[in-house]
Image: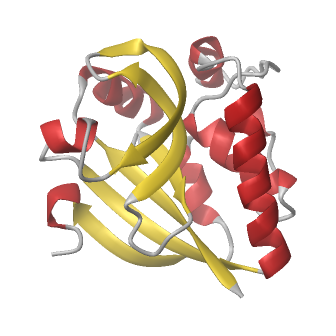
Amino acid sequence: MRSIYLVFSHSNTITSKIIKFFSKEKYSHVSLSLDDSCEYMYSFGRKYLYLSVIGCFNVENIHNGLYKIHKDSTMAIYKLNVTDDQYENVIEKINNIAKSSKGYNILGLLLAKFRIRLNRNKYYCSEFVYNVLSDSCVNILDKDKEIFKPMELSCIDGLELLYEGKVSEYGL
């Protein structure tokens, strides 16, 4: 058995506040991590630190970038046990999306509020995480990946909450 980690976060940026307002959820962003320190996470989000409307596939780091600037960012880390094959499939799917993605699905994110699906080779954060897990044969929720809010992923069977609190206090 191996473990993967779902990292839910809220950075208190204007974009995060808007997403949180419309989603009515505690966290506005979700990432995947493959290591137990969750130092490196994979997701879709802002390409430029100070410009949120342009996004792409990102390798995020809880000690740098947005999380370093916004020290009051909050997060919840959940662990999900998977088989070795599922773990390898997750790695392969992340790599394939990183190579082939056409960018951030801002239109899909906006339409998700109205539960309208948009099929494109672009992703927003929860759409990416759902796609990686579902395409890697990890049993998750029975919904269409294009209309997933980040916190809906916290209902996956077998998730174990490891940490909840400020990003700046994680790992101290």
- Left/right placement of residue 26 relative to residue 13 reads right
Q: Is 80 situated above or below 60? A: below
Q: Residue at 82% across / 20% down in the picture?
A: 119
Q: Nearer the viewer, residue 157 or 169?
A: 169
Q: Residue at 30% across / 68% down in the picture?
A: 164
The image quadrant that residue 25 belongs to is top left
The image quadrant that residue 141 belongs to is bottom right
Across and down, in percent, residue 163 comes to 33, 73
Q: Could you tell me which quadrant the C terminus lies in?
A: bottom left
Q: Is 118 situated above or below 37? A: above
- Left/right placement of residue 129 relative to residue 82 reads left
Q: How many marks?
A: 0
Q: Residue at 78% across / 18% down in the picture?
A: 118
The image quadrant that residue 102 belongs to is top right
Q: Residue at 72% across / 58% down in the picture?
A: 91
Q: Could you tell me which quadrant the N terminus lies in?
A: bottom right
